[in-house]
């Protein structure tokens, strides 16, 4: 009776729902992100380089990241003595929160989306770029020359690749006439005459998303051969783990958004009757998302790193003009055919 | 509509709380060493000289300016993208002109060497 009375009014129920959803999504992010992906990355890199990879903790090394995380709990947090303590502590949390906020608009299955915002993809573009603030803050606050260089490179890189990414999002918005992620999934498959445009936008999106998540071949902010570890050189265990959470979380979120925009989200070529619509949607969505993640890992372990001028040149001199023209072509087609 | 943003706010708060949780655990569990050298910045193992917070060359300054310009233009294109289907040819021609001006701006920045990392 007491609980019923407490939960009586509508807004309290809604508040409990919000908090529970946030906790569930965060847990999914932590487990499906770094905990699983770090292991996957190590296993896949080992496979690509004809090594064995982690093998000893648990069956086939499956519990390696769990053990590593537990180990991190027993390591001291150190703040360098000339660092800015407040900013230094806030930066990793900010990066992790940015990765969590991405997931508000990602539709997992029919009806399974935290909030179907009417400005969905614009919101995604906005919150995913919060990451760069965390990274620059961390690089600056460490008071370490390598961290600072990493943070500055990161700023240049991430603002440059934001534009091609935004143009890809705009193309999808033009084609579907909406910014809501749920309605974008419902509008797919796209009409055949738009395939070339959407295809170009998809490639641009994938390249830009790799750059936004600071992964090889675009991992200059943490280039270990020249910058120690870039912007997180000074970060000790758990704070470093939060940066990892942010990095793998936004990798997963970018893959999920790619799935939503270009691969039909929760829709699949066939469905299993005993799973129901939500189950099927969830299975297809996760399969596609992790397939994209696998592709990005494959790229990472296959290509060497770009030089910074090549990296910025690729964004400003190739991807940006191409995606501007592409947007106009798609817009023209939409107007002609409508 | 306000409810949507309440969700975003609660996500940010709960996320920050859950991210801070392991930091609290570390504070409780981890041993602390009294070795003062642990707080020296790690710059390849040598004792760092000078501050990192000195004057430095913000190489991405011009990129930052160009980004600011383009990002605002992009914000203008979002509403256009949503209503293009209803407005039709007129809106398309307008966007042609808008992106044309933008393209000239990009070409100018390119020609001026603003897009070189130097």
Image: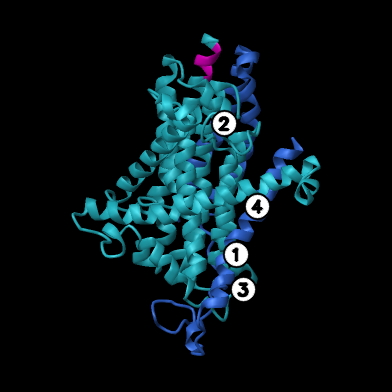
Q: Are marks 4 and 2 in contact (CB under 8 Å)?
A: no
Mark 1 and mark 4 on one chain: yes
Judging by the rendered image, the residue that carries numbered circle 1 is B20
Judging by the rendered image, the residue that carries numbered circle 3 is A84
- x, y (%) of residue B49? 48, 82
- Note the chain letter of the cyan one: A
- Which mark, by number, is residue B12? 4
Judging by the rendered image, the residue that carries numbered circle 2 is A181
- Chain B: give its colour: blue
Q: How far is the residue under mark 1 from the one under mark 3?
A: 18 Å
Apparent side of residue A24 relative to residue A56 in the rendered image (left or right): right
Q: How far is the residue under mark 1 from the one under mark 4?
A: 12 Å
Secondary element under disc 1, as helix, strand or loop, is helix
Q: Are marks 2 and 1 in contact (CB under 8 Å)?
A: no
- Which mark, by number, is residue B99? none
Residue found at x 20% / y 58%: A51
Q: Are marks 3 and 2 in contact (CB under 8 Å)?
A: no
Q: Quadrant of residue A255?
A: top left
Q: Are marks 1 and 3 in contact (CB under 8 Å)?
A: no
């Amino acid at each position: 009776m007491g609980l019923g009375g407490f939960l009586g009014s509508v807004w309290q129920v809604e508040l409990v729902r919000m908090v529970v959803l946030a906790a569930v999504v965060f847990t999914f992010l932590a487990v499906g992100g770094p905990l699983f992906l770090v292991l996957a990355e190590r296993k896949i890199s080992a496979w690509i380089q004809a090594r064995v990879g982690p093998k000893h903790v648990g069956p086939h090394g499956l519990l390696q990241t769990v053990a590593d995380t537990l180990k991190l709990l027993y390591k001291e947090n150190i703040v360098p003595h000339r660092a800015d303590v407040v900013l230094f502590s806030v930066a990793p949390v900010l990066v992790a929160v940015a990765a969590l906020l991405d997931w508000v608009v990602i539709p997992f299955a029919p009806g399974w989306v935290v909030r179907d915002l009417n400005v969905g993809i614009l919101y995604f573009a906005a919150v995913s770029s919060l990451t760069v603030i965390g990274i620059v803050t961390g690089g600056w606050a460490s008071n370490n020359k390598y961290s600072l260089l990493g943070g500055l490179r990161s700023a240049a890189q991430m603002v440059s690749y934001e534009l091609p990414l935004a143009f890809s999002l705009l193309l999808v918005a033009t084609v579907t006439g909406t910014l809501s992620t749920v309605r974008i999934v419902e509008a797919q498959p796209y009409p055949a005459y738009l395939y070339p445009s959407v295809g170009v936008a998809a490639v641009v999106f994938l390249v830009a998303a790799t750059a936004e998540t600071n992964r090889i071949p675009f991992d200059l902010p943490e280039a270990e051969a020249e910058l120690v570890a870039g912007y997180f050189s000074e970060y000790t265990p758990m704070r470093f783990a939060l940066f990892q959470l942010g990095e793998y979380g936004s990798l997963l979120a970018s893959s999920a958004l790619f799935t939503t925009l270009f691969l039909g989200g929760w829709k699949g070529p066939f469905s299993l009757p005993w799973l129901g619509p939500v189950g099927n949607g969830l299975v297809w969505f996760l399969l596609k998302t992790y397939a994209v993640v696998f592709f990005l890992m494959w790229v990472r372990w296959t290509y060497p790193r770009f030089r910074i001028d090549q990296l910025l040149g690729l964004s400003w001199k190739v991807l940006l003009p191409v995606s501007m023209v592409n947007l106009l072509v798609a817009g023209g087609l939409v107007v002609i055919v409508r | 509509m306000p409810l949507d943003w309440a969700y975003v706010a609660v996500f940010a708060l709960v996320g920050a709380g859950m991210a801070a949780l392991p930091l609290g655990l570390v504070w409780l569990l981890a041993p602390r060493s009294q070795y003062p050298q642990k707080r020296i910045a790690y710059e390849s193992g040598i004792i760092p000289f000078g501050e990192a917070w000195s004057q430095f060359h913000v190489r991405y300054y011009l990129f930052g300016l160009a980004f600011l310009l383009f990002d605002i233009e992009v914000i203008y294109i979002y509403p256009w993208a949503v209503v293009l289907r209803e407005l039709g040819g007129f809106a398309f021609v307008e966007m042609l002109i808008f992106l044309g001006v933008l393209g000239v701006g990009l070409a100018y920045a390119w020609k001026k060497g603003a897009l070189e990392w130097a």
